[in-house]
Amino acid sequence: VSGAVRDRLSSDNWRLLNHLFQSIAAPAGPDVDLDAALELIDETIISLVAVGGLEMAHMTRNDGWRFLSIGRHLERLSFVASTLGDVVAEEAAGDPTVLEWLLDLSDSMITHRSRYLRSPEWSSVVELLVFDGHNPRSAHFQLAKLAKHVRMLPSADAGDLASIVADIDGLCHSGASADAAQGELFAGTRAPADLIGACERVALGVSDALTLRYFSHVYEQPHRTDAL
């Protein structure tokens, strides 16, 4: 893909992407072990972080950049919601090892340690990964960014996108009502598990709506026709 748009990439971007491609495309041989695979993954992560840094520092803030940002926030929202949902489904919310894994996976361990000064608990982990509007890895943070960027897309105030934006606003309001002192983490009536599921559904809904509006070559949505 980067090769197809080479003339639109800076020399720094092209150098990073080319190095990333060469490191992955190189034949690994039959004797690759787990350590070598993990080392390659670590190098890939570093390259992708560098690409993301160039994007944030140098890319023009047009609709193309906005779509990249929306994609990143959708991925993070879906990832946080699905991982927390799996923990709830497996009834592992009381396992300290699982909670530490969640924080480490979400790059939020240091934030948790500095804020709570205690071992991870389900209430503190959910507050940090779902409700905290200042944590760039939280569901609330992603929802707020999506609400901002989707509104700025062309013709975003019509059709399915308008209803999707309303759903995002509703979830943002629910997330802002968190009360860590209460057992269910809510000042309202909605349970955290319901909000986690709603976040995952909204992420999929936003992705589908954007695809149909901006990236689909089908001019009419398919509909059922009954035989006469």
Image: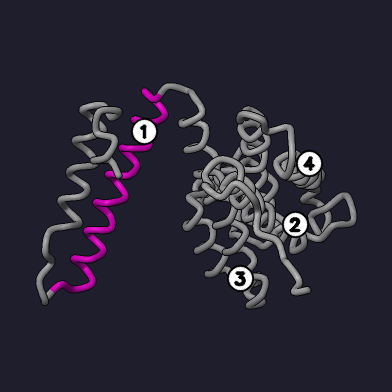
Q: Main secondary structure of the magenta part?
A: helix
User: How far apart are labels 3 and 2 at the CA level?
Assistant: 14 Å
N-terminal of the pair, mark 2 or mark 1, is: 1
User: How far apart are labels 2 and 1 at the CA level?
Assistant: 31 Å
User: How far apart are labels 3 and 1 at the CA level?
Assistant: 31 Å
Q: Quadrant of residue 102?
A: bottom right
Rendered position, 83 above or below 72: below
**Residue tagged by mark 4?**
166
N-terminal of the pair, mark 4 or mark 3, is: 3
Secondary structure found at label 4: helix
- Quadrant location, the N terminus: top left
User: Left or right: 161 with respect to 170?
Assistant: left
N-terminal of the pair, mark 3 or mark 2, is: 3
Q: Which mark is residue 188?
A: none
Q: Quadrant of residue 150?
A: top right
- Quadrant location, the C terminus: bottom right
**Residue tagged by mark 1?**
53
Secondary structure found at label 2: helix
Instruction: Please name which of the two marks, 2 or 4, marks the residue nearer to the observer.
Output: 4
The span picked out in magenta is 32-59
- Compare residues 106 and 168 and report the one nearer the observer: 168
For the residue marked with disc 1, what is the amino acid?
Gly
In this picture the colour scheme is one colour
In this rendering, does residue 148 appear at all? Answer: yes
Rendered position, 118 above or below 2: below
For the residue marked with disc 3, what is the amino acid?
Asp
x then y, percent, for residue 153: 61, 30
**Residue tagged by mark 3?**
86
Q: Which mark is residue 195?
A: 2
N-terminal of the pair, mark 3 or mark 1, is: 1
